[in-house]
Amino acid sequence: MAPTELLRLASLSLLLALVVQPHEAYGSTRGSFLSNDGSAAVSGICATSVIIHGYKCQEHEVKTKDGYILSMQRIPERRFEGNGNAGTKKQPILIQHGVLVDGMTWLLNSPLQNLPMILADNGFDVWIANTRGTRFCRKHVSLDSAQPEFWNWSWDELVSFDLPAVFDFVFNQTQQKIHYIGHSLGTLIGLASFSEGHQADTLKSAAFLSPIAYLSHMNTALGMVAAKAFVGEITTWFGVAEFNPKGQKASAFLKRLCNYPGVDCYDLLTAITGKNCCLNFSTVDLFIKNEPQSTATKNMVHLAQTVRDGVIAKYNYGRPDYNRMHYGEAKPPVYNISAIPRNLPIFISYGGQDALSDVKDVLLLLDSLKFHDEDKLMVQFIKDYAHADFIMGTNAKDIVYNQVLRFFKNQQ
């Protein structure tokens, strides 16, 4: 069977997993994980996906100012590194995943191909972040994940609480400014957070892979239909605070979307992300077994608003009086991306086949950075790459990660 057909089969398996087996908790060939209700006794990402490859790995918990307890993993040194370098200060790097996945998504390829281990083997102190609501981040100081209140957040809270919390934690542990890497939603919350100055004293540089900021040119039929449905069904969806892709309501939602004219769910991965050039079957299969993860329905609605409105703004509560209660004005405030410090070193890598991070939208982002110091902005365009290639591509090391390494080493 040809590789393309294998990937189509894997995508079909993903669709079946979402709409036919909504309650199945997938395990990994590298270990077992939490189900979305947090009920299973499991090992963490370190034990299942890092230590087994010969790397040291630490599990950490970080508390946000609004009470969420986040899981982080730290890979502090090279594989099989001896004690000769003990006590040597290494430059910390914080890696942030996208929506509906967790930090495991960075580790699906082999140690020679996945970004965290490549960074560790090149002498960096690697920290993997996980956002609230994902399988290892379902704890709160006073709320239970079964309560709707636990899910009352959007990516605004990731900007204001999650990212500052993990930055402060890493900085307090290392006493060094931090390189940041975001993919997909990890780029959006990074851009928004940096524009508001949240990490001004702890950020050293930033790399944005497949950036999503402006989303009005997103060209995936499934994504556009989903965005319109979320915005149009706020009242209905707010009856379910947790958006669990493996739950019954989300499965029924996906089935409806797949029946829309022009939406092809046979190759679901392509329908969502664009035509990825460089994935292999085993990695996609592992992805299917471990993702997707839960997020807040409010977060999905906020992303849909970003698609609809064509601006990077805070959550819109739908009524001027509600917005005034939260923001003191009738419309949600806009994140001013051009307010990111002009001397911040930034690396942006985007793909010509990406249906989520469309080229036209990336150009809008670059226009927002047009006054950035010219020698502080590095841009890479990869004609054949789509959204998932940046984290799971078999050739991502040669095409993307080596450029990221070069960029970071230039900031030393």
Image: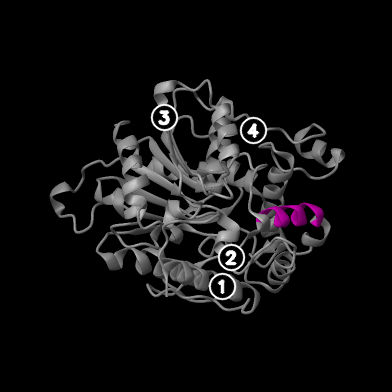
Q: Residue 403 appears at what percent x and percent y?
A: 34, 40
Say what amino acid the circle numbered 3 marks.
Pro
Residue picked out by circle 2? 268
**Alpha-carbon distance for marks 1 and 4?**
38 Å
- Check contact, mark 1 vs mark 2: CB within 8 A: yes
For badge 4, the amino acid type reads Tyr
Residue 132 seen from this side: no
Disc on the earlier residue, 3 or 4? 4
Q: Nearer the viewer, mark 3 or mark 1?
A: 1
**Residue at 76% from the left image edge and 39% from the top image edge:** 326
Q: Residue at x 27, y 59 (%)?
A: 56
- Please name the amino acid that badge 2 sits on: Leu
Distance in Å between CA atoms under marks 1 and 2: 7 Å
**Neighbour tally class for label 4: few under 14, some 14-19, many 20 plus, Cα within 10 Å:** some
Q: Earlier in the sequence, mark 4 or mark 2?
A: 2
Q: Residues within 10 Å of mark 1 (few under 14, many from 20)?
A: some
Whole-number angstrom distance, CA of label 3 to CA of label 4: 20 Å
Mark 2 Cα shell of 10 Å, populated few (<14), some (14-19), many (≥20):
many
The quadrant the N terminus occupies is bottom left
239 on left or right of 61: right
Q: Would you say residue 3 sits in the magenta stretch? A: no
Secondary structure of the residue carrying tag 3 is: loop
Magenta residues (range):
223-233
Q: Which mark is residue 335?
A: 4
| CA distance separating discs 2 and 3 | 36 Å
Q: Residue 178: horizontal and vertical position, in percent?
A: 39, 38
The answer to whether the residue labelled 4 contacts the one labelled 2, judged by CB atoms less than 8 Å apart, is no
In front: 192, or 257? 257
Circle 3 sits on which residue?
A: 345
Q: Which residue is mark 1?
A: 12
